[in-house]
Image (cartoon, helix red, strand yellow):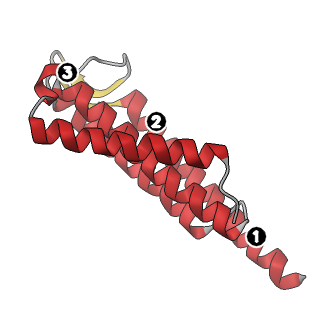
Amino acid sequence: FTFDIPTFLTGFASIGGIWSIISIVRDGSWSEIGINAFAGRSLMFLCMFCAFIALIKIAIDEKPFSKTLSICFWIIGGLVIAASIMFPRLSGYRSSGFELFSSKNFVLIDGMILVVGILFIILGSLIKDGFEMQKEMEEIL
């Protein structure tokens, strides 16, 4: 088990970020930065924490592909897709310029955020296939 610098920094940033989110919610100071900006920060730190878990799993197993890694990418993709639906409903929302089903002031889905979420899910599926191929290679050898 080797604990490298990117894993340490990701863990430090994600745990510190989640701690700050908890303190912002406890203090009620999220209204100062705006609910949309707060939601964006929260999403970033949750995704970073999920990536931290995946990096730890990679370091423990010493294998680049794992089921946990693919699940983490699916979770991140799901969080981002949920954000593409929820963020347009929050005050302070700014359009990315690519919306799905929008009319005047109403935006159903922010398309740019949705595409990022779909890409994470596709990447998770590719990692799952890589993991299965890795298992096959290990069984053959």
Measuring 38% from the left and 21% from the top, which residue is drawn there?
Answer: 98
Q: Which residue is mark 1?
A: 133
Asked if disc 1 and disc 3 are in contact, CB closer than 8 Å, the reply is no
Label 2, residues with CA under 10 Å away: few <14, some 14-19, many ≥20: some
Question: Which amino acid type corresponds to the residue marked 1 in the rendered image?
Answer: Met
Q: Which residue is mark 2?
A: 115
Measuring 64% from the left and 58% from the top, which residue is drawn there?
Answer: 127
Direction from residue 125 to residue 105 in the image, left or right:
left
Label 3, residues with CA under 10 Å away: few <14, some 14-19, many ≥20: few
In the picture, the quarter occupied by the C terminus is bottom right
Q: Position of residue 24 (x, y in %)?
A: 18, 36
Q: Which residue is mark 3?
A: 33
Give the CA distance from mark 1 to mark 3.
Answer: 46 Å
Q: Is residue 81 visible?
A: no
Q: Position of residue 57 (x, y in %)?
A: 59, 64
Direction from residue 131 to residue 101 in the image, left or right:
left
Question: Which amino acid type corresponds to the residue marked 2 in the rendered image?
Answer: Val
In the picture, the quarter occupied by the N terminus is bottom right
Secondary structure state at the residue bearing disc 3: helix
Residue 45, quarter of picture? top left
